[in-house]
Image (spheres, rainbow, N blue to C red):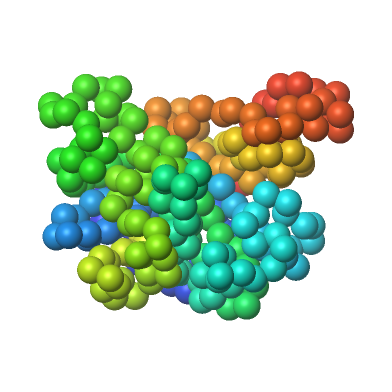
Amino acid sequence: MSDSRLHRATRAELAGLAVEVAPLLLGGELRTIVAGSEVRMRLTEVEAYHGHGTGPMADPGSHARMGRTARNATMWGEPGHLYVYLSHGIHSCVNVVCGPEGQAGGVLMRAGSVQAGVDAVALRRGASLPLTAVALRDLARGPGRFGQAVGLRHPLHDGIDAVTGLEFEGARAELWLPDEPVSDIMTGPRVGVAGIAGTEAFPWRFWIAGDPTVSPFRWGRGAQAESLHTTGVGSMMPSRGR
């Protein structure tokens, strides 16, 4: 997608509930400059998360489900900042904060395709050049790989502002959105999330249909059993997004 079909994200565009904002990010780009290397990543898969008291139903899969803590404080701040957290003590994962300040919400950037800066991404990911088609597909396939690819690290870059693009701890980040929403969006359960939060009760994962960089679905701990218990359906079919 060319620059002429993208625009810089505004706080107003990110001020809605995360589940409403999430599909609007698809086809947009996260652009970063870290250690002098620029990377442009087209967003192909995202997941929405709501904090305590946000939206019409509680989200048991959210880091902010119990309220504000030192870890999730960025989620409660101004929309457009990036909540960068550590997963499994290893992977830095990147979310864009949504909703008005004081109301927690975020959209996890789960996967993307590299539009610029492939060499920098390959170096960060430890991939050998020249890249095979599979290696290129997998550079940012999954939230841990995505975070590594764009170069944002926890805790150093937690809170960086992707609306203003101002330098923060030696890095810059900009979120660009498509002028027209992507037409072919799929929605379904979140990947690897435990319990009911990882079932069709929360179809809060959105992805571009047919894009090879989208990560494969896997059940979180107890989620499949919860799905069977509540619906009697053991495998879940994705549906078209809005």
Residue 130 in which image quadrant? top left
Query: Is residue 124 visible to the viewer in this orientation of the structure?
Result: yes
Residue 53 in which image quadrant? bottom right
Q: Is residue 62 above or below residue 191?
A: below
| For residue 131, side relative to residue 193 (left or right) | left
Residue 185 in which image quadrant? top right
| For residue 233, side relative to residue 97 (left or right) | right
Question: Could you say which is closer to the camera, residue 227 or residue 24?
Answer: 227
Q: Is residue 16 above or below residue 147?
A: below
At a point 21% along the width and 22% down the height, the residue shown is: 132
x%, y% of residue 161?
38, 71
Q: Is residue 50 above or below residue 232?
A: below
At a point 37% along the width and 40% down the height, the residue shown is: 145
Question: Could you say which is closer to the camera, residue 33 or residue 204?
Answer: 33
x%, y% of residue 102?
62, 77
At a point 22% along the width and 35% down the height, the residue shown is: 126
Question: Could you say which is closer to the camera, residue 2 or residue 136?
Answer: 136
| For residue 36, side relative to residue 102 (left or right) | left
Question: Could you say which is closer to the camera, residue 132 or residue 210?
Answer: 132
